[in-house]
Image: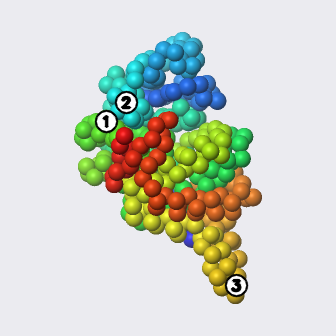
């Protein structure tokens, strides 16, 4: 119920007016491999209705399969300043942060968009986020996303949780304590704010680098907001093993990045709690019925009204149970598998070999 209130508060926030003379923007896109739909994802950034912006791409090696596509698209959109940076092998575990550091060093503008390869936007994206930074008060904006699954069952199941439970939690955190963190695969920030915390490499050892970046910038006294622009996050298809591996990685990482918030996620799983209660005391079945109604109503509101995502009614109960199981599992163990290597997480959520 609180998440519905939080969603209404978020929707009530005014959408920024278009700026007559928007400032130039540098868009940074770290890449690795030829993901399904990558060309369409990148095209949305090339075709922005915006007066002045540049696109920077980063890969490790010339042999990366996405390189021919990027070079072709840069040539096809020659009027857009764009370039590809070959970074080589990263000197620390977080390859994405290393790519961002290399692109930041080569970028020209003060306003920076950092966006993953699986993100798709409409032509008005840059105009929208630039308007949110007009006036200079905002230092970082994190964009909500609607998860679009691939064909696999596990991808569809995870998308159901992302578009409901995950964003219900974020919206609730926003009204309880404000935006003191960043989430998701698209973040917009002022260079001066990134520089104030020691640069992007300040978060190089954190798996949840987006969360830590927002946290550090907020702690430095800058304003962090949840953008009113919702991007599309194409999560692709994964096998059950790969899906379970990264979900347990997220759970263990989140527990260390935000320990009290992680404990509070208990309240985002009302259906499993109601089932446990009714199993112990069957006469409480009316509570289970009311829980189902409230859970589905709030999930519908957040997914469809806030994010514009279709809610898969049949999968949501299963995702609630599975998500609850992963939440419990996150309290145990401190090792994760990431990019083919095993790491230990310290108390702050940093990856240690």
Tell me whether circle 2 and circle 3 mark residues in contact (CB < 8 Å).
Answer: no
Q: Tell me, for residue 87, which label it has, or none.
A: none
- For label 2, count other residues whose C-alpha is less than 10 Å away and answer few (under 14), some (14-19) or many (20+): many
Q: Which corner quadrant of the image does residue 7 belong to?
A: bottom right
Q: Quadrant of the N terminus?
A: bottom right
Please state the horizontal and vertical placement of residue 111, each as a whole percent of the image: 36, 34
Tell me whether circle 2 and circle 1 mark residues in contact (CB < 8 Å).
Answer: yes
Mark 1 sits on what residue? 201
Please state the horizontal and vertical placement of residue 75, each as a whole percent of the image: 54, 12
Give the mark nearer the N terminus: 2 vs 3.
2
Determine the residue positioned at 49% across, 42% down.
337
Q: CA distance from mark 1 to mark 3?
A: 54 Å
Q: Which residue is most to the right?
A: 314
Horizontal arrangement in the rendering, residue 122 relative to residue 56 (left or right): right
Determine the residue positioned at 46% across, 29% down.
30
Q: Is residue 166 visible?
A: yes
Q: Which secondary structure lies at badge 1?
A: helix
Identify whether 299 is placed above or below 28: below
- For label 1, count other residues whose C-alpha is less than 10 Å away and answer few (under 14), some (14-19) or many (20+): some
Give the mark nearer the N terminus: 1 vs 3.
1
Q: Which corner quadrant of the image does residue 315 belong to?
A: bottom right
Q: CA distance from mark 2 to mark 3?
A: 55 Å
Mark 2 sits on what residue? 98
Which one is nearer the viewer's eye here, 9 or 3?
3
Q: Quadrant of the C terminus?
A: top left
Mark 3 sits on what residue? 282
Q: Which secondary structure lies at badge 3?
A: helix
């Amino acid at each position: 119920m609180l998440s519905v209130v939080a969603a209404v508060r978020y929707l009530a926030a005014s959408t920024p007016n278009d700026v007559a003379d928007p400032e130039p923007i540098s868009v940074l896109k770290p890449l690795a491999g030829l993901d399904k739909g990558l060309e369409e994802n990148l095209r949305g950034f090339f075709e922005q209705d915006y007066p002045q912006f540049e696109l920077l791409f980063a890969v490790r090696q010339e042999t990366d399969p996405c390189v021919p596509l990027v070079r072709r698209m840069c040539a096809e959109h020659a009027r857009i300043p764009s370039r590809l940076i070959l970074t080589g092998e990263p000197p620390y575990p977080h390859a994405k942060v290393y790519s961002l550091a290399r692109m930041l060093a080569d970028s020209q503008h003060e306003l920076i968009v950092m966006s993953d390869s699986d993100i798709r936007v409409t032509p008005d994206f840059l105009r929208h986020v630039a308007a949110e930074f007009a006036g200079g008060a905002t230092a970082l904006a994190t964009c909500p996303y609607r998860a679009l699954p691939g064909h696999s069952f596990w991808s569809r199941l995870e998308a159901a949780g992302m578009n409901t439970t995950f964003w219900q939690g974020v919206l609730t955190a926003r009204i309880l304590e404000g935006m003191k963190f960043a989430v998701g695969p698209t973040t917009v920030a002022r260079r001066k704010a990134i520089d104030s915390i020691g640069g992007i490499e300040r978060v190089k050892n954190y798996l949840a680098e987006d969360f830590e970046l927002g946290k550090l910038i907020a702690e430095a006294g800058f304003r962090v907001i949840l953008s009113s622009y919702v991007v599309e996050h194409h999560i692709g298809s994964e096998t059950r093993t790969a899906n379970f591996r990264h979900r347990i990685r997220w759970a263990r990482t989140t527990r260390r990045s935000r320990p009290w918030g992680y404990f509070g996620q208990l309240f985002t799983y009302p259906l499993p709690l109601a089932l446990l209660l009714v199993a112990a005391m069957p006469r409480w079945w009316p509570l289970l019925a009311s829980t189902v109604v409230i859970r589905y109503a709030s999930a519908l509101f957040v997914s469809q009204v806030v994010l514009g995502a279709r809610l898969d009614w049949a999968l949501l109960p299963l995702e609630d149970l599975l998500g609850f199981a992963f939440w419990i599992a996150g309290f145990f163990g401190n090792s994760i598998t990431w990019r083919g290597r095993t790491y230990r997480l310290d108390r702050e959520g940093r990856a240690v070999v």
